[in-house]
Amino acid sequence: MLEIKDIAFSKEGKDILKGIDLSIPDGKLYVLTGPNGGGKTTLAKMIAGIEYPDRGSIKLDGEELVGLDPTERAKRGVSFAFQHPVRFKGFTVRELLNIAAGRTLTEEELSQLLQQVGLTSESYADRAVDSHLSGGEIKRIEIASVLVRQSKLAIFDEPEAGIDLWSFNSLIRVFENIRDRRQGTLMIISHQERILSIADEIIMIQDGKVGLRGPRSLMFPLICKNDCGIRAAGEGEGCECDR
Amino acid sequence: MSAIDKDTGELLKTVADFDPEKFLGAFNIRSNCMSIGRRSTENIKIETKEGEPGLDIRVAPGTKDEKVYIPACVTKAGVDDLVYNDFFIGEGADVTVIAGCGIHTETGEPARHSGIHRFFLEKGARVLYIEKHVGTGDQTAKKVIDPQTECFLAEDAYLEMDTSQLGGVSRSVRHTSAKLSDRAVLVIRERLLTDGDDTAETYFTVTLDGEDSGVNLMSRSVARGNSYQAYQSDIIGNGRCTGHSECDAILSENGRVDASPKLSANSNEAALIHEAAIGKIAGEQIMKLRTLGLTEEEAEAAIIEGFLK
């Protein structure tokens, strides 16, 4: 159980988060959505320890995370996939994923992991995680680095960005699979309609606060009427309420 | 072969991963200005050079898949070792040369090794040259390694040099020059780690005389503490050729690096590129690894290890 109470954060005189309260039970897929600049990514970074709140509490299974550094939070079961993944000169994909796993992955494990994100082990395992990889390739490796940790709480910041449609569909299946097997809690930040459509719950973050929250079936039409900026998967398509 | 003392044995292991008792091929071990062990084989002859300290290493034409070890160790303070080694690689040969130098001192006095190597690669010869430099023992003692390497590559020859200096050497000045004939290729990978008050300077001069000759120079370095490094390369293209020079450096603490890659194209068919990047470890890289469970120190160490790998 993730419990967030009264989390506030301001930067350069602007209030980014204005007292967020959220209770996230285990084993479900939650999608955080809402307008750009509403505070979704900042909240996620607070949970992972990448940013620190001005006030408030974040507890995972009853243990306070605020005050713990990102290393300690990772060890306690929080993972975070960055929207803009970093590149490393000198690390191969295999080495990065071994670090993420905390052990040496077998060839079979590596192959299955990369397959989940639309890459082949043969072509990618020994490639450097550097500027020779495209934006889509590096994004998929970032996602794999979180999947392999099998964390209590895995956070993905706009996983769809920079990924082609085929890989995106594959990624949706990966998220569905994790959701169906109840392997930890997934928290995905997204505007993407396809991702919203697989959520157990949708939480709308707006103007630094929790706006609406509820099961997918209830939230979908409400969010669209509120003009949250949901996009359809296909090129040029608007959200359902626009059609 | 003379008995190998403990310090020399450990240095041999470190710089060349070499056990002369087990290795069946050609080798020469130099320790404190003397050869303490040598073996030639049918295809690789090692002889004492006349007139100056050092060796002539002659690889017969057509020799394939053989290795020759030429490590040098200094284990006594006050030693200033100077050696001239010439490598004559016959036509069509394909061999690996493992050199390397280690200095170990305990008394605080300085010690130095200067290895002056010349490579003469005949037509179609291929050489992989592996060289590791290391200093151990008393950290206050100056340990100086000043290698100079000259390379002459005939038509279709290929020389790949993999050099590393990963700590403990107080001062190093490396000069490497090469002249390439038609279709000859030179690849150099250099890795450097300096710390404390170490200094390391690297100077490359490569002259691409031959048509379709090519060179690829890659230097990766980490400057920690108050250490200083200089990288200077000059690729001179005199015909249809390709050249690439790349210097990547990570700065940590008060480390400093100067990089001066120079290109000289004397033909409009010369295609030459240089790249140089110097900076500290990106905070995002540290943060990413911390979100994977590494501490800040572990993350920095992993990044440096990967970078210098």
Image (spheres, coloured by chain):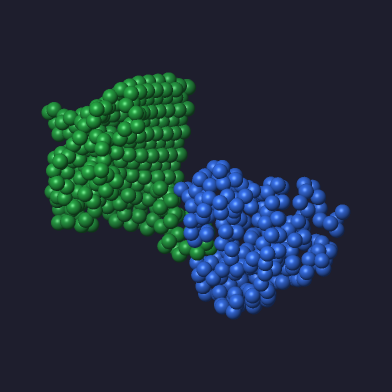
Q: In this view, does B260 lie above or below B179?
A: below
Answer yes or no: is residue B30 visible: yes
Answer yes or no: is residue B264 visible: no
Which image quarter: residue A228? bottom right
- Residue ID at (30%, 35%): B67
Q: In this view, does B268 lie above or below B280?
A: above
- Residue ID at (61%, 56%): A143
Coordinates of residue A226 in the picture (x, y in percent): 81, 64
Which residue is most to the bottom? A62
Coordinates of residue A19 in the picture (x, y in percent): 66, 75
Is residue B247 found left or right of A206 in the rendered image?
Answer: left
Q: Identify which residue, B153 or B48, lies in the foreground.
A: B48
Q: In this view, does B118 lie above or below A96?
A: above
Chain depicted in green: B
Is residue A53 found left or right of B67 in the rendered image?
Answer: right
Coordinates of residue B10 in the picture (x, y in percent): 23, 51
What colour denotes chain A? blue
Coordinates of residue B215 in the picture (x, y in percent): 41, 30
State the quadrant of the N terminus of chain B: top left
Q: Identify which residue, B123 or B178, lies in the foreground.
A: B123
- Residue ID at (81%, 50%): A237
